[in-house]
Image: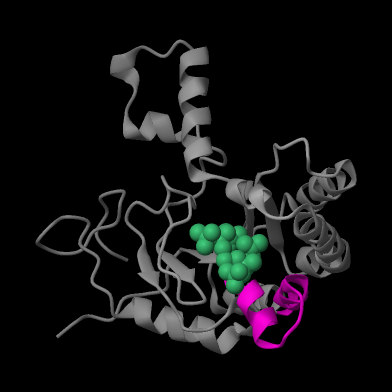
Amino acid sequence: MKSIGELPRHVACVMDGNGRWAAQRSLPRTAGHEAAEAAVIDVIEAARSAGIKWLSLYAFSTENWRRPAGEVDILMRLVRRAIRKHAPALHARGVRCRFLGVSDPRIPPRLVQDITDLMTLTGDNRQMTLTVAFDHGGRRDIVEAARSLIRTATPAEQVTEASFAQHLPYPDTPDVDLVIRTSGEQRISNFMLWQVAYAEWVFPQVLWPDFRATHLWECLDAYRWRQRRFGDVRRPTTTTGEESR
Ligand code: IPE
Ligand code: IPE
Ligand code: MG
């Protein structure tokens, strides 16, 4: 019989399906992005109250710059509006907010300022760490880490998986345990490639704007029944080699 595991330490969501949600209602794609906000807020609170310590949300990829300028512009506006609206509540609930990416000069300076302000405001919070992958690309992070190693003239024999990971953004972030990708798509789309190396995946058949706390519970429940082996054949272990929690 399978053993029931515990909560994942780090849950990451690929929030997909906004455009299809809008299309089903004969609305413009941007209406789907607008409706996504409610799901984001619900999931942050549900994860926090469930005791998840690390939550990452994929909001905008380096590839999403290929979308029509009007859609990109609305996405930037919506993210800014959401930050301004929800910053006080996130802070009051002890959520530390971080952003992964945010290096492209096309991001409006006012949005960059709001992101910086939110990270400063919530930087000492420890209830949960919310990492928003925004203008994020997993390959870019790996290339940047390689550049950083070269800049520090690290001798090749000193480059290990652990030392390499220290050059990734937010190296204190634990590996992702569970990835939830909504909408039925089953691909990585360049998301946190290093950190998802041994993640479990679930693909709920729901479009992101409809995703709510109950869907998160279902995903956590599915995770509890997974046997994580990390390549071993004996007792499951964590990526750090400790015995499973
Ligand atoms: C996810 O929804 C949001 C972003 C990628 C910004 P999509 O916009 O990809 O929605 P679909 O996949 O077209 O339905
Ligand atoms: C991945 O979704 C990016 C985000 C959810 C922000 P996409 O909809 O952009 O991915 P593809 O194009 O289907 O791979
Ligand atoms: Mg999509």
The residue depicted at 79 percent of the width and 63 percent of the height is: 91
Q: Position of residue 6 (x, y in %)?
A: 37, 75
Quadrant, the N terminus: bottom left
232 versus 151 height, above or below: below
Quadrant, the C terminus: bottom left
44 versus 61 height, above or below: below
Horizontally, residue 6 falls left or right of residue 32, namely: left
Residue 26 part of the magenta-drawn span: yes
Horizontally, residue 28 falls left or right of residue 245, namely: right
User: Which quarter of the figure has residue 76?
Assistant: bottom right
Horizontally, residue 113 falls left or right of residue 45, namely: right
Where's ligand 3: which quadrant?
Answer: bottom right
Residue 211 part of the magenta-drawn span: no
User: Which quarter of the figure has residue 153?
Assistant: top left
The residue depicted at 37 percent of the width and 68 percent of the height is: 201
Residue 70 in view of the camera: yes
Q: Nearer the viewer, residue 146 or 225?
A: 146
Horizontally, residue 170 falls left or right of residue 86, namely: left
Q: Position of residue 188 (x, y in %)?
A: 43, 57
The residue depicted at 73 percent of the width and 79 percent of the height is: 38
Q: Main secondary structure of the magenta part?
A: helix
Q: Position of residue 130 (x, y in %)?
A: 63, 59
Residue 54 in view of the camera: no
The residue depicted at 27 percent of the width and 54 percent of the height is: 242
Q: Nearer the viewer, residue 49 or 23?
A: 23
Query: In this figure, what is the number of numbered marks?
Result: 0
What is the span of residues highlighted in magenta in the rendered image? 15-38
